[in-house]
Image: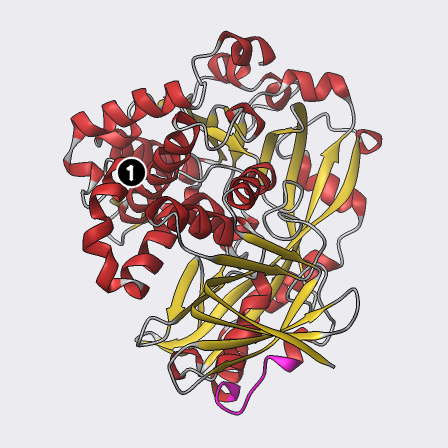
C-alpha cells in the first residue's frame, strides 16, 4: 500500500555518525535546508556507530601500527599515519566548533583524553617500533610521544600488563598522552538531537526499499513505515547513503554506473570485556599490538580503556569472525544478495586472492574462550578467565573492487562512491571511518555541492580553521589547533583529571 509523496532538499539514509556529521555540516552551511533522515531501527547510533560496536579509539595513528609500514630499505613509511592524524584533527575542530557555539553540550559525554600506546615483543618488532617512533616524532604532528624498552618504565606506564611478566624476550612501547577515547554512539545521538531541534525530520523505523532517479534528475526514495507497513515516496535533490554495511545494497539499488563491479566482504568482531573493577582501575590507556599474519587491519589486538556512560571499562580484542550479515541487525542472506552479474567476477577474484584471510577468519571463529584468554595473556600475563566475558561487536563490510592492483582487490578503510552529477553519494568500508567522519563528509560536500562550495568556504573555515591546508606544513597551526580544541573539549578540566 502506498501513501503520501513528499519533497525535501536532502535525504540521509542511516542514523549513524556519517549521516549525523553530514547533516550537521549542511545545517551549519545552509540553515534553511530541508533534511529528512530515514533509519530502519528505532533510534540513532545503534549499529556500527554504537559505543559497544565501535572501538572508539579516536584514530589518530598514535598507536595503530598498521598505519606505518616498513619499506624494503628498512625505512618507515608514515604517509598513512600522517593522513589519518590530520583527518582526526579536522574532526576535533568541527566538534569544538559545535561545542563553542553551544550546538552540542557536555563534550565529556563523548570524548575523553586517554594515553595511546603501542606495545611490541621480540627483537624484530622492538627495532621496528623504535624506527617508527623516530620517524613519527620527526614531524610536528606526533610531538610528545615517548619510547621505552626499560621494564621499570613500562611498569609505570602499564602496571597490569607488566605484573609477573617473564623477561625472556625484548619488549618496548611508545606512549603519547594526547590520545582520546571517543564514544561515537553518544556523539551520534547528540548530533541528531541538534538536527532535530533545527527542524530536520527524523524518521525512525522507516526502511528504504527503493531508489530511482526521475526525469528531472531528482531521486525518488521509496520508504516502508515499519510500524504500519505503508510505503511512502520521498523526492530529494540529494541523497546520502550512510547505512554502514547496508550501504552496498542501497547503492546497488540506485543503478548508478559508479556502483557497479563493487562487492562487500563482511567481518564480524568479538571483544573480551573485563568485569573485575580492580583490573579496570589499574589500566589507563589504549594499548595496540601487532596484528597476526593474515589478519585484517581492524583485527589489530588492543587492550582498550573505554568511557561508556561516564563509566570506565576495559575491553580486549577484537577477535575476528565471519557472518554473512552486512549489519549486526541484518539478514543471513546479505552476502549472497549482494552478488550481481556486474560484480560476480570481481567477487570471485577477491575470494581467490584472500584465501589466507578466509583461513584466518575460520580459525578465529573456532577459538574457545580459553584460547582467547591465551591471546589476552600476551597483554595481561595474569588474566583470569572468570574476570572476562565475551561481547559481540559490530559488523564491518570491507569494499571489494577492481583497482590498478588487479581485479577483486579487498580495500581497507572508507570510500565515497558518488554519481557523476553529484546527486547521490554512498559511504562504504570501515575503520578508521568514524574518527575521520568530518574529512570524509567534506569530500562529499566538494563532490556533490560543487556550485555551493566556494560560497560556503568562509563558513567551512570558521568551522574547521585548517580547511584547505596540509597540517604537516603548518607547525604553528597544529599547536594552535591542539590548544583550542583541548580547551573546547574540556581536556584541561580538573574534573577529567579526577576521573582518571
Q: Is residue 319 left or right of residue 403?
A: right
Q: Nearer the viewer, residue 81 or 132?
A: 81
Q: Is residue 211 left or right of residue 130?
A: right
How many C-alpha atoms fall within 10 Å of the one at disc 1: few (<14), some, or many (≥20)?
many
Looking at the rendered structure, the number of numbered marks drawn on it comes to 1
Q: Is residue 251 depicted above or below 309 in this figure?
A: below
Q: Is residue 338 part of the magenta span, yes or no?
A: yes
Residue 170: tell me if it is visible. no
Q: Is residue 70 depicted above or below 1 in this figure?
A: above
Q: Is residue 89 depicted above or below 493 in this figure?
A: below
Colour scheme shown: secondary structure
Q: Is residue 472 part of the magenta span, yes or no?
A: no
Q: Nearer the viewer, residue 381 or 83?
A: 83
Q: Residue 108, how many percent across, how many down?
A: 54, 23
Residue 400: tell me if it is visible. yes
Specify the quadrant that holds the C terminus.
top right
- Residue farthest to the bottom, as pictured: 341
Q: Is residue 239 depicted above or below 36 in this figure?
A: below
Q: Which residue is mark 1?
A: 464
Local secondary structure at mark 1? loop
Q: Which residues are magenta?
A: 337-344
Amino acid at each position: 500500500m502506498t501513501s503520501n509523496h513528499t519533497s525535501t532538499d536532502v535525504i540521509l539514509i542511516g542514523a549513524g555518525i556519517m549521516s549525523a556529521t553530514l547533516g550537521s555540516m549542511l545545517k551549519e552551511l545552509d540553515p534553511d535546508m530541508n533534511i529528512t533522515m530515514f533509519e530502519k531501527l528505532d533510534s540513532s547510533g545503534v549499529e556500527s556507530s554504537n559505543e559497544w560496536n565501535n572501538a572508539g579509539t579516536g584514530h589518530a595513528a598514535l598507536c595503530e601500527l598498521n598505519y606505518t609500514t616498513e619499506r624494503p630499505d628498512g625505512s618507515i613509511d608514515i604517509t598513512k599515519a600522517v593522513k589519518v592524524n590530520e583527518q582526526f584533527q579536522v574532526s576535533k575542530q568541527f566538534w569544538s566548533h559545535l561545542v563553542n557555539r553551544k550546538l552540542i553540550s557536555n563534550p565529556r559525554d563523548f570524548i575523553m583524553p586517554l594515553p595511546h600506546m603501542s606495545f611490541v615483543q621480540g627483537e624484530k618488532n622492538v627495532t621496528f617500533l623504535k624506527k617508527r617512533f623516530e620517524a613519527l616524532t620527526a614531524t610536528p604532528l606526533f610531538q610528545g610521544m615517548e619510547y621505552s624498552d626499560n621494564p621499570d618504565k613500562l611498569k609505570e606506564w602499564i602496571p597490569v600488563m607488566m605484573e609477573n611478566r617473564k623477561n625472556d624476550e625484548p619488549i618496548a612501547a611508545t606512549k603519547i598522552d594526547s590520545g582520546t577515547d571517543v564514544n561515537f554512539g553518544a556523539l551520534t545521538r547528540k548530533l541528531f538531537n541538534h538536527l532535530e531541534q533545527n527542524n530536520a525530520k527524523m524518521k525512525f523505523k522507516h526502511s528504504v526499499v527503493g531508489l530511482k532517479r526521475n526525469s528531472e534528475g531528482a531521486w525518488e526514495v521509496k520508504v516502508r513505515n515499519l510500524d504500519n507497513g505503508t510505503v511512502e515516496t520521498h523526492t530529494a535533490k540529494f541523497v546520502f547513503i550512510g547505512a554502514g554495511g547496508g550501504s552496498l545494497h542501497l547503492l546497488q539499488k540506485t543503478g548508478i554506473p559508479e556502483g557497479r563491479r563493487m562487492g562487500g566482504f563482511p567481518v564480524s568482531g568479538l571483544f573480551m570485556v573485563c568485569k573485575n573493577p580492580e583490573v579496570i582501575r589499574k589500566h589507563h590507556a589504549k594499548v595496540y599490538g601487532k596484528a597476526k599474519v593474515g589478519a585484517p587491519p581492524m583485527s589489530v589486538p588492543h587492550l582498550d580503556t573505554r568511557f561508556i556512560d561516564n563509566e570506565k571499562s576495559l575491553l580486549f580484542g577484537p577477535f575476528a569472525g565471519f557472518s554473512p550479515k552486512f549489519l549486526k541487525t541484518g539478514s543471513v542472506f546479505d552476502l549472497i544478495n549482494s552478488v550481481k552479474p556486474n560484480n560476480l567476477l570481481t567477487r570471485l577474484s577477491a575470494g581467490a586472492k584472500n584465501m589466507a584471510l578466509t583461513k584466518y577468519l575460520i580459525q578465529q571463529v573456532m577459538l574457545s574462550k580459553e584460547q582467547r584468554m591465551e591471546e589476552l595473556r600476551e597483554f595481561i600475563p595474569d588474566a583470569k578467565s572468570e574476570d572476562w566475558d565475551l561481547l559481540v561487536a559490530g559488523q564491518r563490510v570491507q569494499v571489494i573492487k577492481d583497482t590498478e592492483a588487479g581485479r577483486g582487490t579487498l580495500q581497507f578503510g572508507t570510500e565515497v562512491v558518488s554519481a557523476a552529477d553529484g546527486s547521490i553519494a554512498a559511504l562504504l568500508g570501515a575503520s578508521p571511518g568514524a574518527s575521520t567522519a568530518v574529512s570524509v563528509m567534506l569530500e562529499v560536500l566538494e563532490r556533490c555541492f560543487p556550485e555551493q562550495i566556494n560560497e560556503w568556504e568562509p563558513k567551512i573555515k570558521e568551522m574547521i580553521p585548517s580547511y584547505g591546508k596540509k597540517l604537516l606544513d603548518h607547525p604553528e597551526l597544529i599547536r594552535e589547533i591542539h590548544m583550542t580544541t583541548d580547551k573546547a573539549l574540556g581536556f584541561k578540566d580538573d574534573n577529567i583529571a579526577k576521573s582518571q
